[in-house]
Amino acid sequence: MRDFWLSCGHHLTDRDAGGGLVVTDEFLKAYLARPELNPPPDAGVVERTLHAVLLDEPRRPVDATEIAAIEDADARENFAVLLAWRDHLVRYPTLEAAYLALMRHGVGPTPALFINQLVHVILRNALDGCDDPFVLRAAELMFRPQRLTVHDGSLLAADDESISGANATPVSPLVSMMGLSPAGDIDVLSEDNAEDYFARSDRFDMALDLTAGRRGHAALAQAMQRFIAHLLALEVDIAPLSELRDARLSWYVGLDADGTRIGDRLWDGDALDEATTRRVVALYRLTFRDPSVMVNDIAGDPVYLILAMTPELTLRMKPQNLIVGLPVRDLEAVS
């Protein structure tokens, strides 16, 4: 089996009997290696001592007085945020359970970066054994912001961070076409280069064609199915649509903030103007294989999923909407 996404740290976790990821000391130590936490040469003795102690014993309780004693204000804030995150992760039997708790009860001040990293490693677990590069690349949309463009009739998504480097000389036709400065070469994933994905998966430097009816559009549906099945133990079928016309909108889920706003307008019976319609990236129809799990008044009806980009052509998918937004009875009991 070919590995992928080593950067998510899945190899630092254990698995429980149900297949969930269990936090290990090695996984927690990886957070201490982040630049924000690694004490600089001029760091104070309290900061350096606490960092060293936690590297030796990453689950060690730390009270507020120890954090307050750190000399640098930024370091105090960084340690407080990290330790709150650590305490949340170790409170639950698996990373999946920790994620579900956040999504169901509110993320509070948790940095979006930590949430995205958690989705990254959970998706790596959910997609374990997947050998389809298109599904894996599509799943990246669920934890990494994308920049979109239309070129020769194709809707292309490229990793926002990877195309925002400091090199002023475009080294890729795609980056040149987008008019952006690259961090490295960006290639559009295709049948010809698909096998290269596994060697490049941690570089996030392959763009995805999301044009309706093409493989990337369908691949995202498969990734979402695996995500829902893994976290909620619900079997669903998600079919890509080329348009949403004359559909009975019993229930919908926006897959991002703009998709939710567009869904709200459709729900209210508003007509979409041309500019708004162009911002719809993808549409899907979700059906439950066992309709009895659905809320009674719409049992058996399809759920429509709406993915959209911002007016600035960025895409920030919110996979948590698939967890908290589905019309499932006793949703919090599902896991």
Image (spheres, helix red, strand yellow):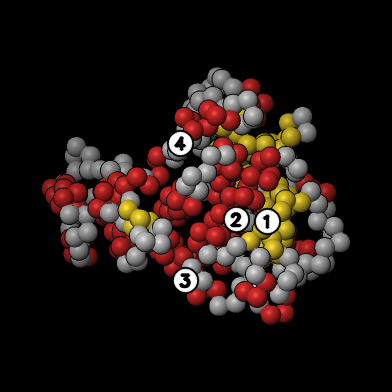
Mark 3 highlights which residue? 105
Disc with the residue nearer the chain's start (3 vs 4): 4
Element class at badge 1? strand
Disc 4 from disc 2: Cα separation: 21 Å
User: Can residue 116 be spotted in the picture?
Assistant: no
User: Can residue 131 be spotted in the picture?
Assistant: yes
Q: Is residue 188 above or below residue 254?
A: above
Disc 1 from disc 3: Cα separation: 26 Å
Q: Dot 3, crowdedness within 10 Å: few (<14), some or many (≥20)?
A: few
Residue 2: mark: 4
Asked whether 227 or 258 is in front, the reply is: 227
Q: Dot 4, crowdedness within 10 Å: few (<14), some or many (≥20)?
A: few
**Left or right of 127 on screen, residue 268:** right
Mark 1 highlights which residue? 238
Which residue shows up at 28% across the image and 43% down it?
A: 33
Measured as percent of width and height from the top left, residue 185 is found at 54, 24
Measured as percent of width and height from the top left, residue 30 is found at 29, 46
Element class at badge 2? helix
Mark nearest the camera among 1 and 3 is 1
Mark nearest the camera among 3 and 2 is 2
- Say what amino acid the circle numbered 4 marks: Arg
Image quadrant of residue 152? Answer: top right
Measured as percent of width and height from the top left, residue 56 is found at 16, 50
- Say what amino acid the circle numbered 1 marks: Ile
Asked whether 123 or 132 is in front, the reply is: 132
Q: Are marks 1 and 2 in contact (CB under 8 Å)?
A: yes
